[in-house]
Image: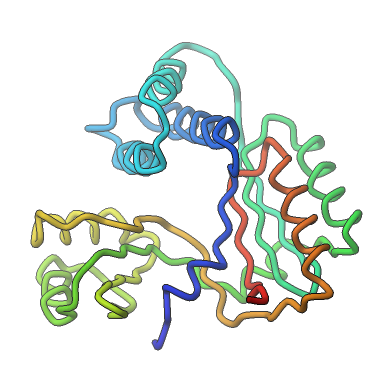
Amino acid sequence: MGRNFENRKNSIFKTAAQKSKLYSKYGKQLYVVAKNGVPDPDSNPALRHLIDRAKKEQVPAHVIEKAIEKAKGAGGEDFAAARYEGFGPGGAMFIVDCLTDNNQRTISEVRNCFSKTGSKLGATGSVALWFDQMAVLSFKGDNVDEVMEAMLNADVNIDDVESNNGTLTIFAPPAEFFKAKTALLQAFPKTELEVQEITFLPQSMKAITAEDLPMFEKFMGMLHDCDDVQDIYHNAELPS
């Protein structure tokens, strides 16, 4: 497939530049995953994965525990996923994933980010078809054949295994994420995953000119300030 994940992963822009935003983001996601499944990581692979990600990003244990305890209670907040797509400064394509308890508020805030930066909010599906949604597992290593054999033996459907500068990256359909991760760690127990996520990878990149860069950065900053925004994906290649 010829992917170069080391280059492309820089285009996967994560929210939560500040710690408070990061904690809020994971607190909301942990609550939703625990509430919609079971609030026990041993019985809920999605929750266990999210806890692992939160710990990797140094989210304190008390934030994680509070979110899970909250999910165990009756009632509580009712969050729903919302996805917005469009074209940002410089013609870059954007996917903005949110969790919201008020759709009108969220769409208003996201639309404001687009309109105030000369960007264009698109229809559902107008941008996503130019991205590949993939499960991505990245770790130190160089033996592609051994990793592919481990996936084959575990009957995991993978898209590709890429080797780049001492790092191996497995690309698989999103539905194969937990199966691929389990097979990998069983075959190579000492593996430390540097990346373990389901994400959107752009099929092609869009170079952002120095002239468009200030507006691009303003747009990103405005999206960051929206409390409901969880993840932002784009295909922009920023000037060096």
Q: What kind of colouring is applied to the model shown? A: rainbow
Q: Residue at x 17, y 77 (%)?
A: 148
- Closer to the camera, 17 or 98? 17
Q: Quadrant of residue 3?
A: bottom left
Q: Residue at x 40, y 16 (%)?
A: 69
| Percent of width and height locating residue 23 | 52, 31
Q: How many marks?
A: 0
Q: Report whether 61 appears left or right of 76.
A: left
Q: Report whether 233 appears left or right of 223.
A: left
Q: Report whether 55 appears left or right of 226.
A: left
| Percent of width and height locating residue 28 | 54, 31
Q: Which quadrant is the N terminus positioned in?
A: bottom left
Q: Residue at x 78, y 76 (%)?
A: 210
- Closer to the camera, 212 or 170? 212
Residue 174, compared with residue 75, is above or below; it is below
Q: Which quadrant is the C terminus positioned in?
A: bottom right
Residue 38, compared with residue 148, is above or below; it is above
Residue farthest top in this picture? 74
Q: Report whether 180 appears left or right of 7.
A: left
Q: Quadrant of residue 76?
A: top right
Residue 1, compared with residue 37, is above or below; it is below
| Percent of width and height locating residue 171 | 35, 71
Residue farthest bottom in this picture? 2
| Percent of width and height locating residue 5 | 42, 74
Residue farthest front in this picture? 240
